[in-house]
Image (tube, rainbow, N blue to C red):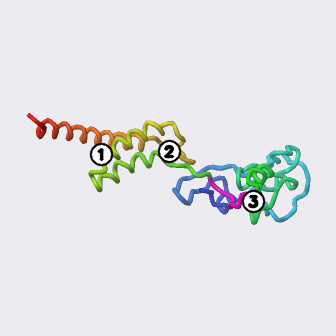
Amino acid sequence: MPLPKWELATGNEAVCTLCGSRNTVQVFPAAFADQHVPARPEGAAEGEAACFDHPNKKAVAVCRQCGRFVCQLCAVDFGSESWCPSCVAAGAGKAKAASTEAPRMLYDSMVLGLPLVSLLVWPLTIVAGPAAVALAAMKWRQPLSMVRRSRWRFVAGGAIGLVETVLWAWGLVYLLTRVGPK
């Protein structure tokens, strides 16, 4: 979730509007510059951002796709946003809007939700339990999210899935030994 610009302009702390976490950030002046006002083509001073492709030129904008700093020469206006030449070349011919955040699957939340939601319709736990255990094992090393999170959802979901799987196996063995041919 992008941090609010009004908080970044007043200090070095901002609160995420989605999760409420406090973030300490260092923001370069080019992030707040009006992108439609031409800047002087001078070199970057000490402490100012420099262009990614031209390190001797002062950055006047930030690419909304990749976050690179760009100078007046490199800034390509795309609607109301600025893109770097690399992102324009990579997105050439594709009619899509600029993405301000990278989407990421939250496998840890899926692993926890799968066995818990399946409890509402308990026969589904015969599939959801082993699926949660397998998903937890396969996606353990995947990045969790853009913000810091722990892996407790993987552990809890895997444990619940394992309990469901063991209970189904025990129930099937019990039925086969009690009801089966004698």
Q: Which residue is mark 1?
A: 126
Q: Looking at the picture, how far across and down is residue 33, in whole percent?
A: 78, 60
Report the amino acid beneath label 2.
Arg
Q: Say which residue appears at 44% left-offset and 49% top-offset.
A: 109
Q: For numbered disc 3, what is the local secondary structure?
A: loop
Q: Quadrant of the N terminus?
A: bottom right
Q: Say which residue appears at 75% left-offset and 49% top-offset.
A: 68
Which marked residue is nearer to the observer: mark 3 or mark 2?
2
Q: Earlier in the sequence, mark 3 or mark 2?
A: 3
Q: Looking at the picture, how far across and down is residue 116, in whole percent?
A: 34, 51
Q: Looking at the picture, how far across and down is residue 29, in whole percent?
A: 77, 55
In terms of depth relative to the viewer, which is nearer, 124 or 118? 124
Q: Quadrant of residue 176?
A: top left
Q: Is residue 168 left or right of residue 102?
A: left
Q: Earlier in the sequence, mark 1 or mark 2?
A: 1
Mark 3–mark 2 Cα distance, whole angstroms, equals: 30 Å
What range of the chain is rendered magenta?
A: 93-101
The answer to whether the residues at label 1 and label 3 have Cβ atoms under 8 Å apart is: no
Give the answer, above or below, for where 164 lies relative to 38: above
Q: For numbered disc 2, what is the local secondary structure?
A: loop
Task: In the rendered structure, find residue 172 and report the number of the disc placed on it.
Answer: none
Looking at the image, the residue that sits furthest to the right is 41
Q: Quadrant of residue 53?
A: top right
Q: Which residue is mark 2?
A: 149
In terms of depth relative to the viewer, which is nearer, 38 or 130? 130
Q: Which residue is mark 3?
A: 32
Q: Earlier in the sequence, mark 1 or mark 3?
A: 3
Q: Say which residue appears at 21% left-offset and 40% top-offset.
A: 172
Report the amino acid beneath label 3.
Phe
- The residue carrying pointer 2 sits among few (fewer than 14), some (14 to 19) or many (20 or more) residues within 10 Å by Cα, namely few
In terms of depth relative to the viewer, which is nearer, 66 or 172? 172
- The residue carrying pointer 3 sits among few (fewer than 14), some (14 to 19) or many (20 or more) residues within 10 Å by Cα, namely some
